[in-house]
Amino acid sequence: MLMPKKIKYRKVQRGTMKGRSKGARDVAFGDFGLQAVEPCWLEARQIEAMRVVLSRKLRKLGDFFIRVFPDKPVTKKPAETRMGKGKGAPEFWVSVVKRGRVLCEINGVDEAVAREILRGVTYKLPVKTKFVKKDILLAAANSDKEISSATAENDNE
């Protein structure tokens, strides 16, 4: 099960899931991705189930990248316990997923196969998702910058 090796505080407050995701809104490592449409807490078990589906479906065809990590402990008090006496013990770990966050990415397969694999992943998740592709214009702009910087370096030599 995924969990951090070391954390600053053993117990944290619940927090809020309002608003859009601060980062990880674009497909960065692969060609296709799965983006959250609504906010949720993604448990470590659900992330593991997502990883298992991806590794089984992809086999040797391509690579996958998981863009979420459970770094928030969720506490629970034992059943039939009276009120008071402090906060409960940490029970499991979650990743806070806000709207627009890319959960996982796939590389090395064509679009039809990627859609099929990511549909299987969606069945394991408690959140509505949508299929997203790498932004071609953004990738082209980045490659143009790299080309222009490479030519500038060559001109300086």
Image (spheres, helix red, strand yellow):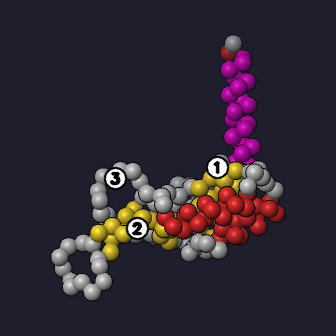
Mark sitting earlier along the chain (2/3): 3
Residue 78: image x %, image y %?
A: 29, 79
Amino acid on which the number 3 mark rests in the picture: Ile
The magenta segment is 135-155
Q: Main secondary structure of the magenta part?
A: helix
Q: Which residue is mark 3?
A: 7
Horizontal placement of 109 versus 65: left or right? Answer: right
For the residue pair 12 and 90, the one nearer the viewer reads as 90
Dots 2 and 3: beta carbons under 8 Å? no
**134 to the left or right of 14:** right
| Magenta residue check for 150 | yes
Residue at 49% across / 64% down in the picture? 44
Disc 1 marks a residue whose amino acid type is: Ala
- The residue that mark 1 highlights is 28
Q: Is residue 109 above or below residue 96?
A: above
Secondary structure under tag 2 reads: strand
One can see residue 110 in this view = yes
Seen in the picture, residue 8 relative to 100 is either above or below; the reply is above
Lower sequence index among marks 2 and 1: 1
Q: CA distance from mark 2 to mark 1?
A: 29 Å
Residue position marked by numbered label 2 in the rendering: 92
Inter-mark Cα distance, 3 to 1 = 27 Å
Which picture quadrant has residue 67? bottom right
Q: Nearer the viewer, mark 2 or mark 1?
A: 2
Q: Is residue 34 visible?
A: no
Position of residue 121 measured from the top left corner of the image (x, y, whole percent): 66, 68
